[in-house]
């Protein structure tokens, strides 16, 4: 795979190039750029299959660069310094990313995914642009839409449609208010990291619920929630107080 690195921090460019040479023999690095304008020109001239792209760069950031490119005909791996809100934005959009400093195991896995997955589409990129907290310190992201990669493609849904999420080993089922269900190859812990900044609460090791879809709480031998689709969701004893706090119940 012909690849480019575009990152305004020269040390990061040099280190990533070194790691690619050591761990990813299937990658042919054809250009390294710390200037986004030069990087854009290289994309047009060299037509890479893979671009490692920093977002926060002077003069022209990663989003502006991609807007200038137009149709995306290459795989993109975004590279960013660790930031929990940036990571959530990547996950909302189901996009590949690497955190600085880059771990070689993550790099190998990311390149392999690029070899075996389809190119990103405009909706994923727009979700990313909307949710990425460029220049906003300590932003609290609460997405209105999320990308769900599943066996037959990619679904873009409004988070208000999600009634609850259910763990199934290393997968998670998303149940929607229109009756649809999507199985996604993410653990419920991964999903929790993405959605719990909004109106979602993990109430059980197997379930996370949308607060807006709770109809009532029922007490008995075991406390449970009745959801708007008629599903009964158990509440773990240690999660009851947390749920009350989030919901504002008295």
Image (cartoon, rainbow, N blue to C red):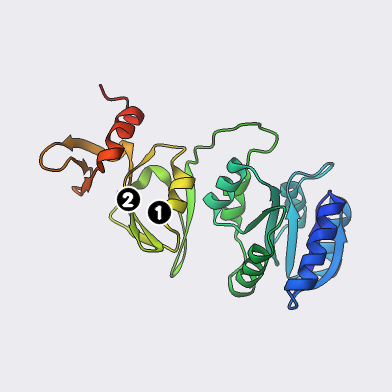
Q: Is residue 230 visible?
A: yes
Q: Are marks 1 and 2 in contact (CB under 8 Å)?
A: yes
Q: Is residue 157 visible?
A: no
Instruction: Tell me how far mark 1 sits from mark 2, CA to CA.
Output: 8 Å
Q: Quadrant of residue 166?
A: bottom left
Dot 2 falls on a residue whose secondary structure is loop
- Within 10 Å of disc 1 (Cα), the crowding (few <14, some 14-19, many 20+) is many
Q: Quadrant of residue 28?
A: bottom right
Where does the image place residue 198, in percent across and percent down from the top left? 44, 37
Q: Nearer the viewer, mark 1 or mark 2?
A: 2
From the viewer's side, name the closer residue of 232 and 245.
Answer: 245
Where does the image place residue 229, in percent across and percent down from the top left? 22, 48
The residue drawn where x is 63% and y is 45% is 129
Question: Which quadrant would the C terminus be assigned to in this image?
Answer: top left
Checking the image for residue 188, the label placed there is: 1
Checking the image for residue 205, the label placed there is: 2
Checking the image for residue 196, the label placed there is: none
Question: Which quadrant would the N terminus be assigned to in this image?
Answer: bottom right
Where does the image place residue 31, in percent across and percent down from the top left? 86, 65
């Amino acid at each position: 795979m012909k690849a480019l690195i575009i990152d305004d921090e020269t040390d990061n460019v040099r280190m990533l190039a070194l790691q690619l040479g050591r761990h990813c023999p299937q990658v042919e690095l054809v250009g390294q750029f710390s200037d986004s304008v030069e990087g854009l020109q290289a994309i047009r001239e060299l037509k890479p299959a893979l671009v490692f792209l920093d977002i926060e760069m002077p003069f022209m950031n990663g989003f502006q660069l991609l807007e200038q490119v137009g149709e995306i005909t290459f795989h993109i791996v975004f590279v960013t310094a660790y930031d929990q809100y940036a990571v959530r934005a990547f996950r909302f959009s189901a996009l590949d990313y690497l955190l600085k400093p880059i771990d070689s195991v993550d790099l190998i896995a990311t390149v392999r995914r690029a070899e075996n997955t389809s190119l990103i589409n405009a909706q994923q990129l727009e979700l990313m642009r909307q949710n990425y907290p460029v220049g906003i310190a300590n932003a609290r992201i609460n997405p209105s839409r999320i990308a769900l990669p599943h066996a037959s493609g990619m679904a873009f849904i409004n988070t208000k449609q999600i009634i609850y999420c259910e763990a199934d080993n290393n997968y998670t089922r998303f149940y929607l208010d229109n009756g649809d269900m999507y199985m996604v190859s993410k653990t419920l812990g991964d999903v929790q990291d993405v959605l719990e900044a909004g109106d979602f609460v993990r109430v059980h090791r197997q379930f996370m619920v949308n607060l807006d879809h709770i109809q009532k709480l029922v007490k008995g031998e075991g406390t449970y929630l009745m959801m708007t689709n008629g599903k009964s969701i158990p509440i773990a004893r240690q999660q009851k107080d947390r749920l009350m706090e989030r919901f504002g119940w008295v």
